[in-house]
């Protein structure tokens, strides 16, 4: 992620990140500190795998906290009222027909920090997200993706 690059988030995504940050700072930090304290009580730190694991976990935790704080500092929240529902933009819900799988799928276009494919939230920087931006209901797109071409018919654009 570029140092000063603005991060686009929906209000829901921003709130989720704030909740995760609060949880990491309050609950997880205490848990990890407790594990470190317990590992120290085992004695000799040079051959203490519990201590090494707890310190690694602490480093990962602090890295995640710093990343979330950075994202929240740079966040630009997409206001629901600013979303033009006639064209696909960040914040849009897009119902598409996937010709290959012969099924309708609903995607929500979000900023990369909020993307979650398991919840059908795709990044505005992903091949499909980027291709859908700016298009309207009724359009059919052929999108180049890493494993070929995906043909999608835009059925609906909503907020």
Image (tube, grey):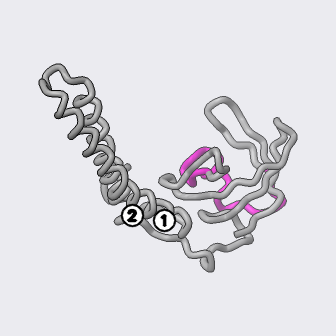
Which type of secondary structure does the marked residue at label 1 adopt? helix
Q: Nearer the viewer, residue 4 or 40?
A: 40
Mark 2 crowd level (few <14, some 14–19, many ≥20, 10 Å Cα): many
Asked if disc 1 and disc 2 are in contact, CB closer than 8 Å, the reply is: yes
Which type of secondary structure does the marked residue at label 2 adopt? helix
- The region drawn magenta spans 122-140
Outermost bottom residue: 81
The residue pinned by badge 2 equals 72
- In the depicted structure, whether residue 93 falls above or below residue 99: below
Mark 1 crowd level (few <14, some 14–19, many ≥20, 10 Å Cα): many
Outermost top residue: 47
Q: Residue at x 76, y 48 (%)?
A: 141
Q: Nearer the viewer, residue 44 or 106?
A: 44
Residue 53's tag is: none
Q: Which residue is drawn at 27% across and 28% down?
A: 50
- In the depicted structure, whether residue 11 falls above or below residue 71: below
Left or right, 19 with reference to 110: left
Q: Judge whether residue 111 can be spotted in this image.
A: yes
Q: Which of 10 and 154 is in front in this view?
A: 10
133 falls in the magenta region: yes
Q: Judge whether residue 2 can be spotted in this image.
A: no
In which quadrant will I find the C terminus? bottom right
Left or right, 155 with reference to 50: right
The residue pinned by badge 1 equals 14
Q: Residue at x 74, y 71 (%)?
A: 86
Give how far apart the Cα atoms at labels 1 and 2 are: 7 Å
The picture places residue 140, in percent across and down from the top left corner, at 80, 51
The picture places residue 144, in percent across and down from the top left corner, at 66, 38
Q: Residue at x 64, y 37 (%)?
A: 145
């Amino acid at each position: 992620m570029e140092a000063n690059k603005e991060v686009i988030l929906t209000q829901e995504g921003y709130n989720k990140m704030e909740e995760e940050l609060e949880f990491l700072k309050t609950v997880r930090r205490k848990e990890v500190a407790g594990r470190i304290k317990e590992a120290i009580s085992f004695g000799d730190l040079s051959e203490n795998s519990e201590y090494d694991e707890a310190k690694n976990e602490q480093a990962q935790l602090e890295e995640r906290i710093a990343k979330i704080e950075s994202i929240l500092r740079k966040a630009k929240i997409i206001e629901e009222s600013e979303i033009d529902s006639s064209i696909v933009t960040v914040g849009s819900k897009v119902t598409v027909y996937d010709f290959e799988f012969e099924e309708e799928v609903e995607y929500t276009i979000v900023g990369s920090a909020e993307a979650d494919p398991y919840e059908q939230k795709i990044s505005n920087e992903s091949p499909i997200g980027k291709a859908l931006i700016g298009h309207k209901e009724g359009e059919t797109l052929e999108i180049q993706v890493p494993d070929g071409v995906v043909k999608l018919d835009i059925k609906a654009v909503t907020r």
